[in-house]
Image (cartoon, coloured by chain):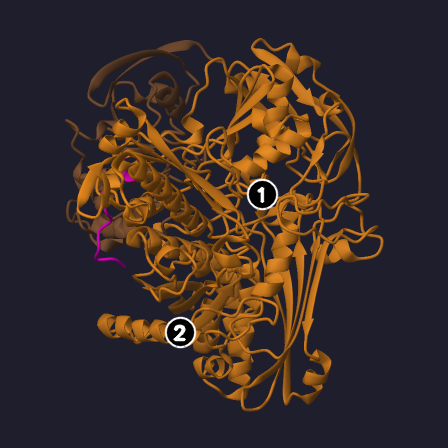
Chain colours: A brown, B orange
Amino acid sequence: MLDPQTVSFTLNGTPTELTIDASELLVDVLRDRCRLKGTKRSCDVEVCGACTVLADGLPVSSCTTLAVDIDGKSITTIEGLAKDGKLSRVQQAFVDHAAMQCGFCTSGMVLATTALLEQKPSASEEEIRHFLRGNICRCTGYIKILEAVKSLV
Amino acid sequence: MSDRLSPPNPDHLEKVTGRTQFITDIEVPGMLHGKVLRSTVPHAMIKSIDVSAALAIPGVVAVLTGADIVGLNHHWGPSLKDRPLIAIDRVRYVGEPVAMVAAENERIAEEALDAIVVDYELLPFVTEAAEALEPGAPLVHGNHEAIKDFYFKGEAKPVAGTNIFQRYAYEQGDVEKAFAESDRCFESKYEFPMVFHYAMEPHCVIASFHGDSLTLWSCGQSPTAVQKVLSRVFDMPLARIRIISPHIGGGFGGKASVKIDPLVAALAWKLRRPVRVCLSISESMLTARRLSATVHVRTGVRNDGTILAKSVRVLMNGGAYADTGPAVAVKAANRAIGPYRIPNLSLESVAVYTNTVPGAAFRSIGGPQAVWATESQMDEIAEALGLNPAEFRNRNLLRRGEHVRADLRPIDVEMGEAMDIAAQEMSRIKALDGDNITYDGTALGISDPGIMPVASVVMRLKIDGSVAVISNSVEIGQGVRGVLRKLASEQLNQPIEAIEVLTPDTAIAPYDWGTGASRSSLMMGLAIEDAARDILSQVAEIAELVFSADPAAVRFCEGGIIFGNEKKTFSELLHTYYGIDSGEIVGVGRVTPYSNGGRLAQAPLFWETAAGQCAIAVDEETGEIKVRHYVSVADVGRVVNRAAAEGQDEGASMMAFGHTLSEELVYQDGQPINATMIDYHVPTIDKAPENFVTVLIESGTGPGPGGMRGMGEGAILPVAPAIANALAAGYGARIRELPLTPERVWRAIREKRGS
């Protein structure tokens, strides 16, 4: 264990300050300390994308990110996308296209898509496939996910 | 491909906002966290385990080892009683649980694992099925205790003094005579690898003993099987064991029957405090995997393409514990038959123990292994006879109502229709795409779902017209809650918003066999039909009593009942009946082998099938296969939720892309060398075909409500042989070993060109 450190960041728009152990992973801090369980843990090795969150708008794997490294950043988790009870357009597209089954990859998939469309509002199919390659879904076969994302560009 | 959007699904709203409570999200007050120390050696006697240093770590509460469980009924298994709760004196595979630490948090528990010292005395090991069969091979188990009718009907047939835990055989006609009379005989061997389920949520269980009762929050697909095993292990009445099954992040069979529940319960039993054990994905990879298989197929044909005889010999690697392997072996044999008229048929399947991760059920158990072999060979025979593969298949196809096997239910679909649709759809896609650079391959798969017609449901019609549907069907992503909701809405003629499908909980939900084998929508649908009849008869009786209604004339209408010209709300009916403005009607629905005049008793309940056609292109520089288009066609009887049903076939097909192109758990020196998600590659989104068409035929011929049959597994069957057939057709390279890795493909093409 390392010495406790203070980390200040914006979490879904709310300024947040936590005293944490320097070795704590972001996924654990979000799930266990911040009680935001929508961020999912699967592969532990930055391969599957289930734990994706946005740091200053860019997708990062929270399973391999030290929580101390998000100091000063703005973090968005799946809980931060819907505003005033209204789904974001990416969330709405996933619902409309039934682009999920078990739902365990959905948080990461929706956040990665959000980041993609932020950067490239008219992403080509090739760009979509390339960008989302770091998010595994074992249930849907990706077909309905592709339909959902393509409906937004 | 769907142009129809899904109806609003409350599950989806929860999932897309991150609010769904999965098993790994659940917290029970006062719970500790457990971590598992696993064997690092493939086969050994445990000489000693020193846990003293681990126990001295602050925050560690207890350590469980085999020494703790000697007073319990410590061996269990769904088919053979071969598995200890935790290793007692011997380990049989790398990854076997040897000790468990319970601590205040996961990190402390994990650190404490490093402080445990295990002294092993190594034993000779065997990881290959063929080697496990040889005389003098190390025996993984000293004796075999098969248990009858425990989980599956019947019992496994192990062979004493060998590693064989299941042997199955079937004969019809005179195979040897038919081979002698055949113009040509074809014989080949096909290899199918060990593959991992990779449900994205790892296995997780929370167990809590309180007083003389036990409650488990389980990731299991078969809550009543978990309950039964725990009842035997702890010698507790079933009624004191409660299994709660929240949302599960995928299963695919890797969480079917019983997996880590007894292990976690044993730790809770020692602690007498709630404990949560959540595996890592790497640990899940050491928990269950598909049985690898070597399949020998010999087929005798006339020169005109008529099949006279087929002999199939399957050898399966079942790993260190039999688990559901005995059933997988039987199904692999049956699923090798295919939708063809084979007058002389010989099937044999043998499953053996090895010092590897236990083999277990995986989507269409035994099916992909068998169909890989037989449908590859169909194309090889067609080529040798100079026939078009579709024409060769057509010549031998069974028509609806003909027998696949004399003792099984006749086939209830037209496979020729499905194959034709697949071909038409592929032509349409290619024309639209302007594609003239890909090569096509086709395969057909049929499977006999292992469905016991045993299910029950409780439906509680509340005075306000809302309805609680209470069953043990577990939501693992297949959408069963949505389907049951719709079926209950239809059967009770109530708006869908009035129906709530509750979280499975054995304390309130009646017995069901389990969630798997494409059974839940169908079985629970039939049970809902029965429960709706029960509610109607109670309501009619009450209406006669309080409103002098003719009970035979009573029907459901929205929010109430109608009889003759009269309409009453449920509230009016029950208020008048009970005297207070409260109450409910409880309906029970059952499915048994005697239901529907006994028509459900014959196996299989229905045939689950798929026709698959792919179009591939190979990068000849690298050997990488790109599947550009794929068509999946199946007669599912009736579609209840189109988007969910299509999603099942799309997901099953893409899952098969994995075992076809990249997935294989590799053993070297007794060690699984790629059992992490860094080294084990499942399909990613860039591998999805450019065009994917799912056709669901609604023939209305299934045994369920509205003529539905089960689905969700069939589409996995044709993919591997279809792709291999396309490779052979386009590049002349016939590969009989999966996965079709770039290296294998590159070498095969080069060898073909070289010759």
Residue B30 image point, x, y percent: 49, 13
- Residue range in magenta is B1-13
Residue at left 51%, top 83%? B383
Tell me the chain of label 2: B
Report which quarter residue A16 is drawn in: top left
Q: Is residue B61 magenta?
A: no
The dot on residue B288 is: 1
Tell me the chain of label 1: B
Residue at left 80%, top 52%? B162
Prevailing secondary structure of the magenta residues: loop
| Mark 2 surroundings: few (<14), some (14-19) or many (≥20) residues within 10 A | many
Q: Amino acid at mark 1?
A: Ala
Q: Which of the two residues, B412 or B382, is positioned nearer the viewer here? A: B412
Quadrant including the C terminus of chain B: bottom right
Q: Is residue B101 at least partly visible in the picture?
A: no
Residue B203 image point, x, y percent: 51, 34
Q: Is residue B10 magenta?
A: yes
Report which quarter residue A108 is drawn in: top left
Residue B293 image point, x, y percent: 62, 59
Q: Is residue B528 above or below residue A68?
A: below
Q: Is residue B255 at least partly visible in the picture?
A: yes
Q: Which of the two residues, B71 or B651, is positioned nearer the viewer here? A: B71
Residue at mark 2 = B419
Q: Is residue A24 above or below residue B412?
A: above
Residue at left 58%, top 14%? B211
| Circles 1, 2 touching at the beta carbon (< 8 Å) | no
Callout 1 secondary element: loop
